Image (cartoon, rainbow, N blue to C red):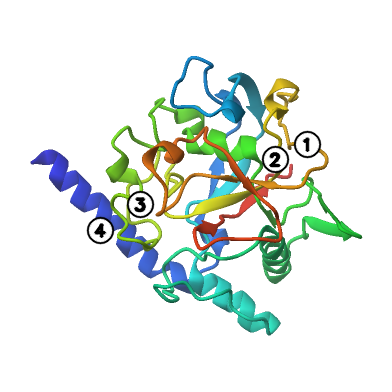
Amino acid sequence: MKKTTFLTYAFLISVFTFFSFTENNPINFMTKVEGGTFKMGSKDSDRSADNDEQTEHTVTVKDFELCKFEVTVWQWKEYVKANKLKMPVKPTWGFVDNYPINNVTWEEVIQYCNWLSKKEKLTPVYSQNGPNIFCNFNANGYRLPTEAEWEYAAKGGKKAKETKFSGSTTVNEIAWHKANSKGSPHTVGTKLPNELGIYDMSGNVWEWCWDWYNKDYYKVEDGNNPKGPTMGERKSVRGGSWDSNINYLRPANRISTIPSKTHEFYGFRVARSIID
């Protein structure tokens, strides 16, 4: 009975919180993730892990900020309206304001981050030279998290309890996935958060990260605040989605996609560097 009461209370809090979300900017929902050292990836002995998650290795990340919620349809509409752009391809369930935006490419997400930075009078993070996009991690604007930052936050940072998924070993408490989503994403923040108060890091939509993807990169990765390979063809995507089998919801799991392409289960959340 006590567990049921707690779950109900937590659900109502998340819903009431989100009713004000569409009237505010993401800056009001950024949470500080205190940096630290953690084990990134999966053990070689973990039979549920894919080869690109191995070998587990020690990584240190600096303090940074991460939004508690995935970017929503409503927030993307504001961006589209301000820049006279077109909405992405409409998904089969339509555009629902409180759902996470989906069907957006990595390249479109980069442009959104720079627009949001300028809107909030912050220094844009991204610049472009020909086909190459660069990230100034010393700027205070919005950006995508690195894979290391994303996994560290998903695993609970310094408050990590070493659960199988982001915030729980009971997947239905924290994630919308293939077995319970009924074929679509859901309003952000309606499942329980993880240890850091961050929602939907397992399930709802896959989340674009900054890093180029390389299945063997862990073998040579510098564990000091890594930012991924210098070049590549595909970008890393994390967290699983409403269309994912449960094994894909583990924080260490990795997939990748060409940055100019997308799917109806791809979205993102924003991060920021903490500048002294």
Kind of residue at badge 1:
Pro
Residue drawn at the location 81% of the way across and 49% of the way down: 136
| Label 1 or label 2, whichever comes before in sequence order | 2
Kind of residue at badge 4:
Leu
Secondary element at image label 1: loop
Rendered view: 244 above or below 188: above
Determine which quarter of the picture holds residue 151: top right
Kindly give the residue lying farthest to the top in the view shown: 45
| Label 2 or label 4, whichever comes before in sequence order | 4
Q: In the rendering, at what x and y percent does residue 231 appear?
A: 82, 42
Q: In the rendering, at what x and y percent does residue 244 appear?
A: 42, 48
The residue labelled by disc 1 is: 229
The label nearer to you, 4 versus 1, is 1
Kind of residue at badge 3:
Trp
- Of residues 241 and 152, the one nearer the viewer is 241
Rendered view: 60 above or below 206: above
The residue labelled by disc 3 is: 176
Q: CA distance from mark 1 to mark 3?
A: 31 Å
Q: CA distance from mark 4 to mark 1?
A: 42 Å
| Label 3 or label 2, whichever comes before in sequence order | 3
Report the quarter where the N terminus lies: top left
Q: Which numbered marker is on residue 84?
A: none
Determine which quarter of the picture holds residue 174: top left
The residue labelled by disc 2 is: 213
Kindly give the residue lying farthest to the left in the view shown: 1
Residue drawn at the location 39% of the way across and 61% of the way down: 185
Kind of residue at badge 2:
Tyr
| Label 4 or label 1, whichever comes before in sequence order | 4
Secondary element at image label 4: helix
- Of residues 187 and 23, the one nearer the viewer is 187
Q: Which numbered marker is on residue 12?
A: 4
The label nearer to you, 2 versus 4, is 2
